[in-house]
Image (cartoon, grey):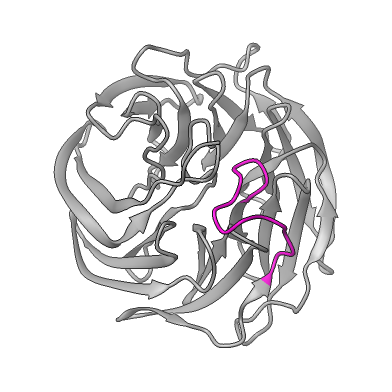
Amino acid sequence: MSRHHRRRSTLRAFARGADGTLTAAGTYQTGGMGGDQTDAPTDSLASQGSLVHDPASGQLLAVNAGSDTVTSFRVQGTRLTDRHMVNSGGDFPSSIAVSGNLAYVMNAGGAGSVQGFRLTDKGLMPLSGSTRSLGLHDKKVPLFSSSPGQVAFSPDGKDLIVTTKSADTIEIFPMGRDGRPADQPVVNASASQVPFAITFDARGRMLVAEAAKSTVSTYRIMIDGKLEVAQEPLPNGQNTLCWVERAGDFFFGGNTGSSTVTGYRSDRHGRLTLANEVGIATPPSAQSQGVIDLAVTKDGRFLYVQNATSGTVDGFRVGANGSHTKITTVTGLHSFTESGMEGIVVV
């Protein structure tokens, strides 16, 4: 069994050039401690959404899993200022979702929970009466394979969604007008095993990456919180698809077991297909081992991929047909052995 590492949580900032290349622009301490889930093979937090930028408020939110806290910064170009830290309301926070002036933090340890906050000029303010249990059975530092994968809001903000990996469920909390979730979630069986990351297409349908068979399933969220499968699980032929991000009508998924990135496209009917026959948009390389988190620029022109084992970030230019070309590799980041980096965002 691996030990639980606690270390100071650090953010690295980079300036992005017009051509998508990255230049180091600063290092910032969150004031909290990082952490590692038990037996995590590549990704310390085993989640998507551990680092989130909210354009409306101009704030960057980061979990501190080792100290059960969340830190907010104000983003000013490549500088992070006005740091505030707040208790996460549970054990081992690993994912954050934002909708309007609401932020919900997913605590992955113990029974698991979601905790609500208001986004204010002074950072996150806890929302009383907003804590909801996920009913899991884990230790305070969870086993990576049984922890929840992500918390996300539906595009209209009416539902809060959590994936639970070992339970193979997608749990929907309908949201009240007061910003608090329903007392109990609507529990939906996942269409495939080990649901992990969540994103949405242009029509508001939910795409979920499933790690067991490296598939993506597409759902409609119904008014009662139940899910309707809009497209059955689509396999990509790779190993351990965990992360998925949207870039316009294209989507990119990170396959940590294969150290590859898969490209998908959505047609005018919303049907998802692989961008090429073999399911590999990005072939593996020596500097791109342990693909985990991904981030896409708002205009969909650039994709950035975090490689945990190598301690690198690859940057790609996305073409009009969804193809992409590597334009930069940042080296010298914290590489994963028993502990490593996780979380990447474009502002």
Can you give x and y, in whole percent of width and height, for residue 24 in the image? Answer: 15, 39
The residue closer to the viewer here, 306 or 32, is 32
Can you give x and y, in whole percent of width and height, for residue 272 in the image? Answer: 70, 32
Which residue is at 68% across, 46% downward?
146
The answer to whether residue 249 is visible is no
Vertical placement of 150 versus 58: above or below? Answer: above
| In-image side of 50 versus 223 (left or right) | left
Can you give x and y, in whole percent of width and height, for residue 132 in the image? Answer: 67, 74
Residue 145 among magenta residues: yes
The residue closer to the viewer here, 222 or 65, is 65
Q: Quadrant of the N terminus?
A: top right
Which residue is at 46% across, 25% downward?
290
| In-image side of 86 versus 214 (left or right) | left
Can you give x and y, in whole percent of width and height, for residue 78 in the image? Answer: 18, 52
The stretch of residues the image draws in magenta is 133-148
Vertical placement of 296 versus 307: above or below? Answer: below
Residue 253 among magenta residues: no
Q: Please, what is the dominant secondary structure of the magenta stretch?
A: loop
| In-image side of 342 versus 258 (left or right) | left
The answer to whether residue 274 is visible is yes
The number of discs equals 0
Which residue is at 34% across, 27% downward?
314
Which residue is at 61% across, 30% downward?
241
